[in-house]
Amino acid sequence: MLGSPEFPLLSKEGDITVGGAFSIHSQVSKPLLSFTNDPESLTCSRINFREFRFAQTMIFAIEEINNSSSLLPNISIGYKVYDSCGSTLPSMRAVMGLMNGQERTFDKTCSGKSSVHAIIGASESSSTIAMLQISGVFQIPVISHFATCACLSNRKEYPSFFRTIPSDYYQSRAIAKLVKHFGWTWVGVVRSDNDYGNNGMETFITAASHEGVCVEYSEAISRTDPSWRVERVVRVIHGGTARVLVAFLAQGEMDILLEEALRQNLTGLQWVGSESWITAGHLAIERFSGILTGSLGFAIRKTQITGLREFLLKVNPSQNPHSDLLREFWEATFGCSFKSKLYVQKQCSGSERLEDNSNPFTDVSQLRISYNVYKAVYAVAHAMHNMLSCGPNDEAGYQSCQWKDNLQMKEVMKHLQDVNFTLPSGESVHFDVNGDPAAIYELVNWQGNQAGEIKFVAVGSYEASIPNGEQFVMNEPSTTWASESQQRPQSVCSESCLPGFRQAVIKGKPICCFSCIACGAGEISNSSNPGECSHCPLEYWSNGDHSQCVPKVIEFLSFGETMGALLTAFSLLGASSTLLVLCVFYRFHHTPLVKASNSELSFLLLFSLTLCFLCPLTFIGRPTEWSCMLRHTAFGITFALCISCILAKTLAVVIAFKAKSPANTVIQCSAPLQKITVLSCTLLQVLVCVLWLLLAPPFPSKNTAYATERIILQCNLGSAIGFWAVLGYIGLLAMLCFILAFLARKVPDNFNEAKLITFSMLIFCAVWVTFIPAYVSSPGKFTVAVEIFAMLGSSFGLLICKFAPKCYILLLKPERNTKKHMMGRNQ
């Protein structure tokens, strides 16, 4: 039981009555409950100057409207102001008083009408909800100036509720974006243990998780909590590692939290506040400067109300000598008393000047919530103006209203929902379908000036009603913190991973707590705190610190590298040596030794050997479409020509020493046979190469499978069958040549042509048999090097074994260069 309703603290009669419920007192007594006596009435104490200013702002707006000739011209507005004491029980008592009046007699007929047509208040979400549980049944519109709980936007539960302050749904999301903007991913949160704090913090935590912000701890306090609970909350904050504290607190909870924080020396935190306390002037004092300087938070945009300060300065107990509230306000302001008591040091005269005293009541520099009260009163006035069809009525053009004796609350609600007007400040006032205004905030920063005073400086804005969605904007590149030399605070659970590393969640901890693991080969991370490393494209590879993808190293056997230069040198050396031998043979072409070696075939063989030595040059350098086709066909044809020449010489030797016909006949038959052998064997290889080029020619390709960190430029064979057919044909010719030479190995010793061919073919076959496994197993450019080495090795073997002994005789032993010696008859 609440006890008997009290009289309104401030009231005035009028045609239309607007009720007001403000937390004029901030402390509620808890009477002892007894089962034998009637419970005592709740009593409130400790006047709240800021809330008293809200009540006086409501009265100011009503008086301004009453003096207006354009708004409700012939209708007067009265008011009744009750004290909600910032608590639910007094709020219920206040709304009962506003609805029923203060009469305690039972002999009157119930009219079913409320004594007020609309209610302005209350200042807390929980108190407003308690009021709506009662007033909503009778559809009495309630317009709050300070109740921000997002739960109040539920039209099904609170159809008669309106407000001139945005919902906490937007403020909570704005705070989450603010925290993310400054890179604070590890925060602690403390909230009021009521609808305002619990709903606002729930929205914040949800929005923060979407922004990648983690909450280390979440604590709740109430102004009625015992001191040990508040001490425990401050100890939790003090022991946390988060350097940013989001305080979603009403002023009452903020007051007791700061007192305990001051006692425990809680410093070094970045405070992020809600609109309820972020512009509270009584907190911006030197006593709390070490704790709160640098605080950030969103607040309602401030505005000037013309004439309000002058109206407030006129408040005096003489306005209503019977008002206990005015006397209490006066005594609290000037520290005096109207009662004559011995222990009173100062007696109030009533002639003290408010302009000589500075307190939150007379401070109109931060008119934010007061302006919401002002807007709420004007919203009610415009709704009533439209409902009463106020407009020009007489010939003189004076406006008047059509008064209705039976004003239905439901009709008042309808016109209030549709209200849309512009205040003298230029701001448009209207409500959405949920009874909420447009969500527009200022980002306020607590900055100290040279005089040591804390000023509320607007450093950004947040608007949720723009067409493209929410917008958060910083006015300045950086916010001024506690001092010019102080760095922006850092608050993270884990330091950001450097480029080249990725986050790895630590088991059992929030996602903001992670370890940094280096990206693997071919992976990069070039942004802070990547969840995963990204793979480089196929032709790119990660750099040394895995911060960016760089083109892979292009690898091929080039003329500029050591191995390529050496192979080129050996190739040119072989070609030069072969040409030198050719010159020697040409110089001695008339001698018996050269004639016995079949000079035509010898010259053709030396020419083909020269081409075999030059063929490796086509394998060195960047592969192109033409070089790939040239290198393999040139290799196959030149070596086929070379082996064909040796095969023809071998056949000539075998025929010459195995034939039973006369020598002249053998010589006449062997010459055409040698030419046919060379031509047919070479043309057959040419045919194989042509078919290979027509059906599936070699082409340049990029091999990324063997070495992931580099690209190997190579010539794809096109058709492996074509390559092995060319190589196999050369091997077939070499084996045939070796067999024939072996059969003719017992010719006269002085004519050792067959022996030289046998030995040279043995080296040739050994080189190419060794080449096959080496070629298959060699990686990258070494595959080409092995192939070149096989060509050079076999070519040098042929050159040395075939022509070195003959050059020795031609140049150093000319006495052995005779026909007799060639025929083995020198003895």
Image: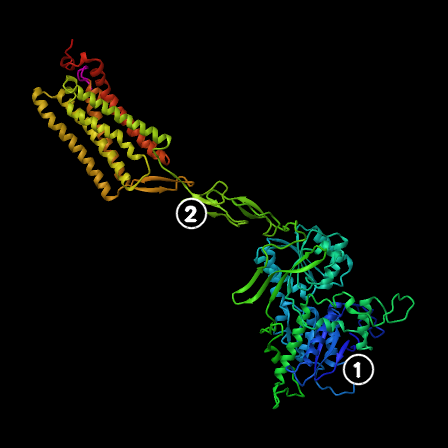
Which image quarter is the N terminus in? bottom right
Q: Measured along the vertical axis of the image, is residue 454 above or below residue 67?
A: above
Tell me the tag on residue 433.
Answer: none
Earlier-in-chain disc, 1 versus 2: 1
Q: Nearer the viewer, residue 820 or 476?
A: 476
Helix, strand or loop under label 2: loop
In the image, taking residue 658 as reference, residue 231 lies left or right, namely right
The crowding category of the residue bearing disc 1, from other C-alpha atoms within 10 Å (few below 14, some 14 to 19, many at least 20), is: few
Residue under numbered circle 2: 537
Query: Where are the magenta residues, as a range?
Result: 745-751
Q: Residue at x 14, y 17 (%)?
A: 592
Locate residue 194, reporting x and y percent: 69, 65
Q: Quadrant of residue 755?
A: top left
Residue under numbered circle 1: 104
Q: Residue at x 28, y 39 (%)?
A: 628
Queried whether the magenta region covers residue 228, the answer comes back as: no
- Contact? badges 1 and 2 (CB < 8 Å): no
Locate residue 23, reporting x and y percent: 74, 70
Q: Nearer the viewer, residue 12 or 747?
A: 12
Locate residue 141, reporting x and y percent: 66, 77
The crowding category of the residue bearing disc 2, from other C-alpha atoms within 10 Å (few below 14, some 14 to 19, many at least 20), is: some
Queried whether the magenta region covers residue 748, the answer comes back as: yes
Q: Nearer the viewer, residue 645 or 425?
A: 425
Please name the amino acid that badge 1 sits on: Arg
